[in-house]
Amino acid sequence: MSVTLLWVVSLPGFEVSHSSGLLDSIRDVKLFDSSKFMSQDFKSIKAKKDREKRWRCCSSSTNLNYACVGQPGLESAGNFPLISNVLANPTAGEVAVSSEQKVYDVVLKQASLVKRRLSSKGELDAKPDIALPGNLGLLSEAYDRCGEVCAEYAKTFYLGTLLMTPERRRAVWAIYVWCRRTDELVDGPNASHITPTALDRWESRLEELFQGRPFDMFDAALSDTVNKFPVDIQPFKDMIEGMRMDLWKSRYKNFDELYLYCYYVAGTVGLMSVPVMGISPDSLATTESVYNAALALGIANQLTNILRDVGEDASRGRVYLPQDELAQAGLSDEDIFAGKVTDKWRSFMKSQIKRARMFFDEAEKGVLELNEASRWPVWASLVIYRQILDEIEANDYNNFTKRAYVSKAKKFLSLPIAYAKSMVPPSRKLSPVMKA
């Protein structure tokens, strides 16, 4: 699950996996035993000496048009740009509501939370730790453990977070770990035992921690994070919904359906992260446009993973490609299972790559507007992850038997480029897309 922070967590070493929703890199890592913790009762963390021991981790057409979907009557909607994608052939009598329209209300709500904080305080600073006797030591240990997990499984990303302020750095670690644990439910060693009921319990546990009643060390770190920053619960719930989808859905009839899935499993990370990463005080962009860019980066990363892993998914009977567009290209699931690179396949892949790049282009507009201390890891994510598309092309579009990846040397060379981009200040002149 990348980052998309996807903004942040989609950096090398923390790849977004469309099959699980977020992580390719944890398939063989037993981060926690989901079959055990799911059956336990929810409890509040208490600062008692007998609990001061170290907690353990529970073991359509690709020619996209940019359209404004803000409607009259929506508070502060303005001209909020989203990458438009209307259902091509809605059933007679049905209202054609695109997935972007469904996501719009969620995005607008997140932006509204941040704007209220900005208007009341002038800048997005974290609330101080609540100094309750006996709690601060445990809370500090919780954040440290989140940092250790991040450093172990996402080394490049972890280094990028060290440029952030301590409060933002710790908060991003907490979000990273929650997303990773959530992904582990459907992609970990106990994935075969996970049921919709188990995911319902995980969602209930999420609600508990948002109400200040965390269950364990990692929950405690996230609970403190959402208390300090204007982070809303909806993107977290939507990510769990993406995990539910993976339990039963293996085909997507059109891009509208696929877009919604990409939002659930990847775009949500951007919405979780923007309040923590912060928007530059020099930015003239609308808050909504920054959230839109965060969402776009998540979608771009997820589409990139889908194109990279076509062969791997086919081996498991899964096809994460728009069925109607396959048909228009003269292709079918059988062609994918056969794994032959033909002219039809090359043409189809070119159009899919073009779409992913358009989402990356949209994401760039928002990265410029982030707080200076948060830009580098996001730029690194964008620059490096976009290169996967170049590698697919270099492999002659053979994503059946060849896995496109960016070499360590290329990643290393990309970091100073990303750092230079992160030093560019926000535009003082609003582009038409960014204007409210």
Image (cartoon, grey):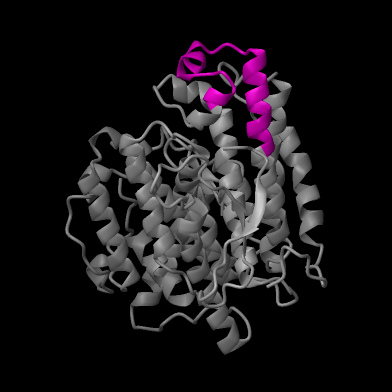
Is residue 43 part of the magenta span, yes or no?
Answer: no
Say whether residue 139 is left or right of residue 128: left
Q: How many marks?
A: 0
Give whichever of 341, 256 is nearer the camera: 256
The residue at 56%/88% (across/down) is: 120
The residue at 28%/43% (across/down) is: 33
Q: Is residue 269 above or below residue 432?
A: above
Give whichever of 81, 13 is nearer the camera: 81
Q: Main secondary structure of the magenta part?
A: helix
Residue furthest out toward the front: 93
Measuring from the top left, give residue 106's x and y in whole percent: 46, 64
Q: Is residue 24 visible?
A: yes
In the rendered image, the quadrant that contains the C terminus is: bottom right
Measuring from the top left, give residue 227's x and y in whole percent: 42, 75
Say whether residue 192 is left or right of residue 75: left
Q: Is residue 158 visible?
A: no
Measuring from the top left, give residue 413's x and y in whole percent: 78, 40
Measuring from the top left, give residue 221's x and y in whole percent: 41, 65
The residue at 31%/37% (across/down) is: 247
Q: Is residue 140 above or below residue 347?
A: below
Say whether residue 125 is left or right of residue 141: right
Q: Is residue 237 above or below residue 411?
A: below
Q: Magenta segment range?
A: 326-354
Is residue 330 part of the magenta span, yes or no?
Answer: yes
Q: Is residue 254 above or below residue 159?
A: above
Say whether residue 99 is left or right of residue 424: left
